[in-house]
Each structure stands twice: as C-alpha cells, then as structure tokens.
Amino acid sequence: MSDRFDCDVLVIGLGPVGDCMAALASLQGLKVIAVDREPGIFPLPRAAVFDHEIMRVFQMMGVAERIAPLCRMPERYQFLTPGRDVLLEFRFAPQKVSGWAESYALHQPGVEEVLRERLAELDVDIRLETQCERLEQDEDGVHVTLRDAQGESTVRARYVVSCDGAASPTRRALGVGLFDYAFDEPWLVLDTIIDDAGDMPRLCEQICDPRRPATYLAMSGNRFRWEFMLKPGENPDDLLQDAVIRDLVAPWNCADRMTIERKAIYRFHGLVAEDWKVGRILLAGDAAHQMPPFAGQGMCSGIRDTVNLAWKLAWVIRGDAGDALLDTYQTEREPHVRSIIETAIAMGKIICLQDEVAAAARDAELLARQAAGEQDLSVDYPALSGGCLTGLPDAGALFLQPVTGEDRFDRLLGLDAALIGRDLPPVSIPGLRVLDLSAPEMAPFAPALTDWLQDRGVPAVLVRPDRHVFGAGDPEELVRQWTGKLQETENAQVKIPA
Ligand SMILES: Cc1cc2nc3c(=O)[nH]c(=O)nc-3n(C[C@H](O)[C@H](O)[C@H](O)COP(=O)(O)OP(=O)(O)OC[C@H]3O[C@@H](n4cnc5c(N)ncnc54)[C@H](O)[C@@H]3O)c2cc1C
C-alpha cells in the first residue's frame, strides 16, 4: 500500500453489514479501517431471522461454528387466520443449496458480538466513538474527516463503503435520492424475555386478523418478538403503555413472566437508493435499501451486498480489474434486492389488511388455494443477472456447497474464484483456483459436484469468490470469458462527481 493511503477501504458504520464488510475485505487481504460513532453494539434486536446464504457468508468469515449454537432453526413460517386456520405456510428445509439450514432465528446483538470479536481477530483497525463528518474524493481516493473525543482527524482511503444505516448521513451528503415503494405501515415492535418459557410455542407466525394484524416470533433462547399493527388514527403513545402491551400479549398467557426489553413504533417501508456508487464511495445495507420485515431479509440483503462487494474491491485494488468492476455491484444487487422488497411488500399486503370485507375475501381465496394444494411457497430468490457474469445457463445462480459429515466444500474455495471440473487446462490467473474433481482433496465432494455438472451436460463451472456461478460450460471458454470480463473493466475512468 502506498504511503499516500491510510487504508484500502474505510467502512463507515459497524452494524451487522459494516461488520461483514470489514471482515470480508480484510480476509481478502485489504487494509481496512472501520469506524462507528457508538461505543458498542446496538443492544436490542432488530433482525430476528436470517437464511442459509448468510450462514454461508458467516462460514466464509470463519464464524459459522460460533454463530450456529446461538440460533434456533425454525421449521416453518405461517400466515394464520385469527381462528388459526393456515392461509400460507412456508416450510424450511434442513439443508439448502448453500449447505446450511434454510432459516435461523437469532438474537441480533449476540450475533453482532461474534462478528465484532472476529474483526478484532482480523487485522481491522476498529475505531469506536468515531463519527464520520465529511468525505471529499478525487481520482485516486477519498479524504475522510473523522471526529472522536480528541477532535478531528483525516484518513485517506482508496475506497469508502458506507454501511451507516437507514438514515445514512453519507447517502444524504452525496445527495442520493431514494425510490419509494409507497408502502408505509406503522407497527409496534416488542422485544421480550419470558421466564420459564418452556411452554411458549417455538413458532414464526403472522396472525392476519383485520382487527389487529400481529406477528409472533420465537427468537433464540427465551427471547420472543411481537409486532402489532397500529389501527388508523391510533395514537402511538397509547400503544406504548405497558398495560396496553400486556393486554395485547394476553392470548399467549405469559404477560406475568414477561420482561419488556424494547417497545418501539417502526414505520415499515420499501426504499432503494438511486446510486449505490458515487465515485469511490459505495453504499451497502440499510443505507442502500430498506424493506418491511415480513420476509426477514433486510439484514440478509445488506450482508449479500458485502459478499458481492468484497471480492470486487480486492480485485480492483490489487490491480486485477478496473474500477468499472465496481459498477457491476449495483447492476447485480439492485434487481435482486428489489425482487425481495417486492416479495416482502406482497407479504405485507396480505398481512396488513384491516378492512374486514377484504380480509374475508383474502381468507376465502387463500384457504381455497391451501385446500387445493395450489400454494407456491418457494422463498428462493432470483439469480444475479447482468454485471460480471457470462450469459450461459446457471450464470448468477448460487453454487451448491456439498457437505460430507462435518466437512464443507467451501473450505477448498477460500476467498478465490474457482474453475471446477475434470481434465482442466493449466491456468495461472491471480485469484482463480483450479479444482480438478479427480484430485484427492476433492473426493468427499466429487459425487455431488459431478452430478451438478452432469445434470447440466457441461464439463466445468467457474464459480466467483461470492459463490455465484460465473458460467458453466467449456473450461477454456469460461477462463477466456473471465479474463475478458475483468479486462473490460480496466480502461474505464472513475467518475468523480463535481
Ligand atoms: C422490527 C425489525 C425487524 C427486522 N427483522 C429482520 C429479520 O428478521 N431479518 C433481517 O435480515 N433483517 C431484519 N430487519 C432489518 C435489519 O435489522 C436491518 O436491515 C439491519 O440491522 C441493517 O444493518 P446495517 O448494518 O445496514 O445498519 P445499522 O445496523 O443501522 O448500522 C448502522 C451503523 O452506522 C453507524 N453510523 C451511522 N452514521 C455514522 C457516522 N456518521 N459515523 C460513524 N458511524 C455511523 C451507526 O452507529 C450504526 O452502528 C428488521 C428490522 C426491523 C426494524
């Protein structure tokens, strides 16, 4: 690293997304400074569930084994009538393509503690109680003015990733607008600890009661979440009264052994930033997109941003690709996150119905479809498209991770791209591993990988460092397209806004 730079990447904001960004960039060999204005982790849960893909990212970060014991694996997610008839049911698989269970219920602060612990183990320069005040960029880098108890200081970074949350001061300072899905519903969010919780149902439920739509969710351990929708004209302060809250949870027979950890009114909405990259400054997580929590995907989407971005930053900073590779970040991530926001809003529109007649019609339709076994309850999200991918079949899909006993395939991938197949040509390209299925270390995983290739009738697959398929087909053609895609990015100049 040149003396002109204090770091390759400065991460602003150490919520779960900033934690993952800093860890993944550091694991890619980049020098990272990470700042947060708070002295510690936000102590209350927001995310209550995350999915298999995120556990795979935690595996990549070397923390899956520490996080798994902190989580509960829900078996299903149900939308119910007030009489507990099932309107919709999502059943969660014990193992998905990522090699991990489909869904995990978490206690967000507990998981964030593990992520912070990992940052301390890695070579990340963590600066807490340090606020980012200003950003000024030029063709080479970004001057970041920080303020801590000692006063102001300046750091020069090649790139900045701003994971500074929904209110994102960076997004505002850059003048980046938000696309608004015009979904805006106020809900009371209640986090509780229940003593002697053995009798509490370990479920994830939406109670689609037009008189008061509600969410019930057993998080991990003795932590439970309720969310109650506000009625039109209802005063939020009234709903925050403990006596009212105890009435709301009365049907669960636990009000007398419940400690309220947090009660807050949130407005659930869907927003997407118009630009996720402005010169050398990138937005990730809630700074770039927000969604209602009905699909449990806000934090997951932010963590997907970081795994998409970390390798691209590394390739660009090492000089193995041009800055334009970073333009593919929004190209690939925005359609993906929009499809999830639209799913979450569609779920919200089912749940949030407060008109009794419309709710009765909804119930009749969904119960009829349920009886006819016609519900499409897949929660698989789309493959990536556009960006740094071939146009070949399966490009952009999440690649499988075979698991044999406790042994997981991704350990052979590390943080590199990989060409996987049989009788592969010799290749010497930085950051690209060649994994021949006949090699002894591939033996535990070769049957599943061979099946994957045979099912598609292809001899090889090239997998990107973020575990998405770059393309599947002839190995020499895949390597040619990989180098071509990276070279394409080399001559574009960084566009610095005036
Ligand atoms: C009720 C509710 C339920 C949810 N449920 C789920 C769920 O089940 N699953 C899921 O995946 N997601 C869920 N989410 C969404 C999830 O909580 C968020 O998407 C996630 O926490 C966002 O993480 P982040 O790191 O982007 O932002 P944040 O966690 O908000 O972190 C931003 C950080 O930036 C710091 N910061 C801000 N400005 C500055 C500055 N100028 N200088 C230095 N530091 C700064 C802040 O101190 C903060 O630590 C839910 C959200 C809510 C509200």
Image (tube, rainbow, N blue to C red):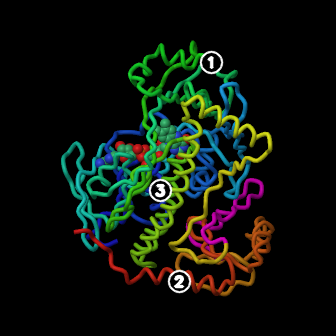
Residue found at x 69% / y 43%: 90
Residue 412 among those drawn in magenta: yes
Sequence-wise, the earlier of marks 2 and 3 is 3
The C terminus is located in which quarter?
bottom left
Q: Which amino acid, by three-letter code, is at mark 1? A: Pro
How far separated are the C-alphas under marks 2 and 1?
61 Å
Residue 23: image tag: 3
Q: Secondary structure at mark 2?
A: helix
Q: Horizontally, is 482 left or right of 437 in the view?
A: left
Residue type (three-letter) at the residue carrying disc 2: Thr
Residue tagged by mark 1?
Answer: 251
> The residue tagged with tag 3: helix, strand or loop?
helix
Closest to the observer, 38 or 246: 246
Residue 244 drawn at (x, y percent):
48, 16
- The residue that appears at 51% across and 66% down in the rendered structure is 332
Residue range highlighted in magenta: 394-419
- Name the residue: 39% across, 39% down: 40
- Residue assigned mark 2: 483
Label 2 beta carbon less than 8 Å to ligand 1: no
In this rendering, position of residue 466 left or right of residue 88: left
